[in-house]
Image (tube, grey):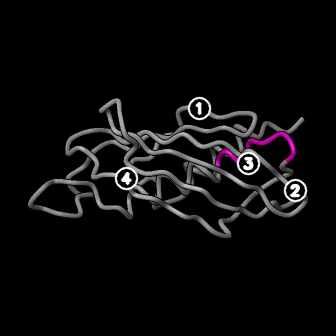
């Protein structure tokens, strides 16, 4: 039996960009995944405010969505992003970790559909939300 969670974890840990951002897979299984990205001054987009760059948030969401697809019971293997829409809701609070959660809510023979949210440590409005489609590739 194939351990999809282990494959997804190895895949994420092998991506140099994910390592550079400090992305850590915190949960995975049955089409759901969680990833954290610690605050780092190297990821700041606006030095005046200390806010994390939107591109770093995008990468965390994209990677989390891909992990959710890879862990879905109906997904046979790898995946790649087809389309990913990010809605930025507010600036992330400087100094706080970003936590992403993704759910693969529908999968066909060729395409998986995913929703995700990025939050900082403030319990309230998300930093960003995502909706996307991903390829479904064989093993």
Task: Estimate how packed mark 3 is, as few (under 14), some (14 to 19) or many (20 or more) residues with alpha carbons within 10 Å.
Answer: many
Q: Residue under circle 1? A: 27
Viewer-proximal residue among 53 and 139? 53
Q: Residue under circle 4? A: 89
Q: Which residues are magenta?
A: 67-74
Task: Estimate how packed mark 2 is, as few (under 14), some (14 to 19) or many (20 or more) residues with alpha carbons within 10 Å.
Answer: few
Residue at 76% over, 40% down = 4
Of helix, strand and loop, which one carries label 4? Answer: loop
The label nearer to you, 3 versus 2, is 2
Residue at 73% over, 60% down = 79
Vertical position of residue 8 compared to residue 133: above or below: above
Pick whichever of labels 3 and 2 is earlier in the sequence. 3
Pick whichever of labels 1 and 3 is earlier in the sequence. 1
Q: Position of residue 73 (x, y in %)?
A: 84, 39
CB under 8 Å between discs 1 and 4: no
Q: Residue under circle 2? A: 108
Q: Compute the Cα span from label 1 to label 3.
A: 13 Å
Q: Compute the Cα span from label 4 to label 3.
A: 27 Å
Q: Position of residue 10 (x, y in %)?
A: 63, 46
Q: Position of residue 82 (x, y in %)?
A: 68, 70
**Picture quarter containing residue 111?**
bottom right
Of helix, strand and loop, which one carries label 1? Answer: strand
Residue at 83% over, 49% down = 75
Q: Determine whether, in the image, residue 9 is placed left or right of residue 129.
A: right
The label nearer to you, 4 versus 2, is 4
Please tell me the numbered disc located at residue 70.
3
């Amino acid at each position: 039996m194939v351990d999809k969670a282990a494959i997804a974890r190895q895949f994420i840990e092998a991506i140099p960009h994910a390592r550079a951002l400090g992305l850590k897979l915190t949960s995975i299984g049955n089409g759901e995944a969680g990833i954290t990205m610690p605050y780092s001054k190297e990821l700041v987009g606006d030095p005046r405010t200390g806010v994390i760059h939107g591109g770093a948030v995008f990468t965390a969401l994209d990677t989390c969505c891909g992990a959710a697809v890879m862990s879905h019971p109906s997904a046979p293997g790898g995946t790649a992003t087809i389309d990913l829409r990010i809605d930025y809701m507010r600036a992330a609070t400087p100094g706080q970790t970003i936590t992403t959660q993704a759910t693969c809510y529908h999968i066909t023979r060729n395409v998986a559909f995913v929703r995700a949210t990025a939050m900082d440590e403030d319990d309230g409005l998300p930093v960003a939300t995502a909706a996307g489609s991903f390829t479904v590739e064989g093993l």
